[in-house]
Image (spheres, rainbow, N blue to C red):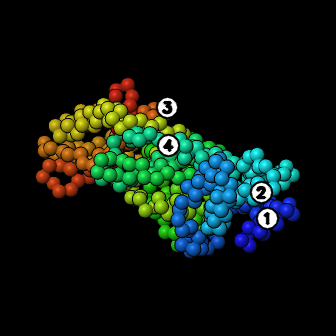
Amino acid sequence: MRRVRTARAWVAHGCVLATLLAALMLSAGAWARDKQRTKERPDASASTPRDGLSEARLLEVYQLMARGETRQAFDKIERLVQDQPNFQLAQLVYGDLLAARTRTVQTLGDIPAASAKLGAAALADLKDESQLRVAGYKDRPQEGTLPSQFLKISAQTRSAIAIDAAKSRLYLFTNTGSGLRLAADYYVSVGKAGTLKSQEGDQRTPLGVYYITSNLDTKALNEFYGAGAMPLNYPNMLDLRRGKSGSGIWLHGTPAQQFSRPPRSTDGCLVLSNPDIVALVKHVSIGDTPVVVASQLVWKPIAQLQNQARPFETALNAWREAKMAGDMNKVLSFYTSDFASFGKSLEEYAPKIKSEIKSINGHNVELKDVSFLHWNDSAETMVTTFGEVVEGKRTGSHKRQYWIRGSRDWQIFFEGVI
């Protein structure tokens, strides 16, 4: 009871804001530090929280407060801030519940105007974070729906990720025997200037279909990136086609002294809390896990997505059949005039296609473990990955293609072995 008596004493002397304002200043300052610092990174295991359920615990406190069960809410928030002392939003709620013992608290972060002014920007960020976390809990996707980009995901693809930037929410899907299943979702921070990244240094998060390219060694990471970091393949082939620049877009954690960052606070990366990035890393397969970043996700019934996939499947199979038939002109008609593959034009790439057709020699070609993800903005594109295996051979090429829908239906503007 000693901690509770001390807290009451703070209220009595008008000092309840000490912990709260410390949390606000931490929120305002920690994420603004230059990420080029060279400080050696501490052991991630020492700063990674134990349970990874902090958001659920905070939301339970909100529910208790809404029901007027303030005693139970106080007990739970006190335990939460003991377990996660750097969870600034939890500290804010803790301060409110302390203040509620002597006066009526009207809103989240209900502190005297003079004190609120000292941390106005940080207080606004924490309120935004709170609203987005609550919205993520309330606005759950309907059972039997998937993001509209997931037209077909191979059963061999271990996991898939979709991010709704407007909601600051990351959704993790794992593959089951019956298809993708929503396994978890997390609060995530995006770029200071929002989304639609187009150039180096614009502090925006890119939108599109990406893949995780590596899982960086935490021992070699700057402490700014927290308990984990996974780079994305920005700029992807569609980005390059559109002349976009920049690099270094990562999914990563937070410094040890900070639990989470405001909704819009990064230089373009996607930032999760340390327990969340640790949980996420366990489900990711390098080079194989797709990451869709959308301004706003549209969820559709799985049957509707399957129907939507059929026209593209027809085009993909027509390309395969043309290769089996050995019709070089027909095969080339599936490629755009501005096709490029790692710096090679269609004219320069054509000998490779011709060589592949020759090796097929009329045999059947099977496309294995096919996935394709749909992206639709100013143009309709498809990112497809598959194994191309010629009958009689045990192995084949693992390819990725980017298709675009134009006046002549679907055509390929990039193709490469991955």
Q: Are marks 4 and 2 in contact (CB under 8 Å)?
A: no
Q: Residue 49, percent across and down?
A: 56, 67
Closer to the eye: label 4 or 1: 1
Residue under pointer 1: 8
Does dot 1 land on a helix, a strand or a loop? helix
Q: Residue 193, percent across and down?
A: 65, 44
Closer to the eye: label 3 or 4: 4
Judge from the rendering whether residue 360 lies leftward or rightward of residue 10; answer left or right.
left
Q: Which mark is residue 378?
A: 3
The amino acid type, in three-letter code, at marker 2 is Arg
How far apart marks 1 and 2 lie (CA) works out to: 8 Å
Packing grade of label 3 (10 A; few <14, some 14-19, many >=20) is few
Question: Which of the marked residues, 4 or 1, is nearer the chain's N terminus?
Answer: 1
Residue under pointer 4: 140
The amino acid type, in three-letter code, at marker 4 is Arg
Residue under pointer 2: 101
